[in-house]
Image (cartoon, rainbow, N blue to C red):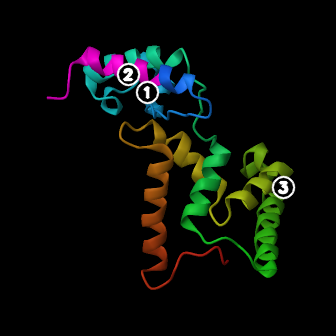
Amino acid sequence: PAGSFDAHFSFAQALTEAAKAVPGTMVVISIPESDRVGSDTGPSIEVGGPGGREALARLRAVVGRVESAWRPASSEESFEIVRRRLFEPITNPDLYAARDATARAFGDQYRRQGRDFPSECREESYVARIKAAYPIHPELLDRLYQDWSTLERFQRTRGVLRLMAIAIHALLGPERPISSDP
């Protein structure tokens, strides 16, 4: 009913060639990130098992000839995505000052108690990370992206967004909107 396996790849090849021939045309294809990281040894669940893995390999071969690959967001970009999706932007200058004071207070504490924290926490760039991720601490986001993203069914940014939304909603309650206010 859906055509043969080879017919799908003939279509993909014709589509990419047609897009290549027309200026300003773009074909967007999303490939599972967890499979890209592990190449051909990534978890089968993301690509649909052995048949899905074969289809993915063939699709990459067809698309690879004409691709201009876009890579998923870096960790820092992902923090920004999560923050923007879960919290209203800070527009009040007093709230910027409160955010900056909070970040400075963390930085000061990390420098004062340096032996109790990783050395990177004492660097000024870490204070900048706290500001960028505010009101979420960047270490929480690091743990979610670096540790939890290795779980088979955890979907990186989407999974972090969902988990954080549930936690924030539970903390604030349904009657209070999510905001960056301290």
Q: Residues within 10 Å of mark 3 (few under 14, many from 20)?
A: some
Residue under numbered circle 2: 56
Quarter of the image with the C terminus is bottom right
| Contact check, label 3 and label 2, Cβ < 8 Å | no
Q: Identity of the amino acid at label 2?
A: Leu
Judging depth in this view, the residue of 30 and 173 nearest the camera is 30
Q: Give the mark nearer the N terminus: 3 vs 2.
A: 2
Q: Does residue 88 belong to the magenta stretch?
A: no
What separation in Å lies between label 1 and label 2 (alpha carbons)? 10 Å
Quarter of the image with the N terminus is top left
Q: Residue 22: which quarter of the image?
A: top right
Q: Residues within 10 Å of mark 1 (few under 14, many from 20)?
A: some
Magenta-drawn segment = 1-16
Judging depth in this view, the residue of 115 and 81 nearest the camera is 81
In the image, taking residue 64 as reference, residue 142 lies left or right, namely right
Residue 8 percent location from the top left of the image: 30, 22
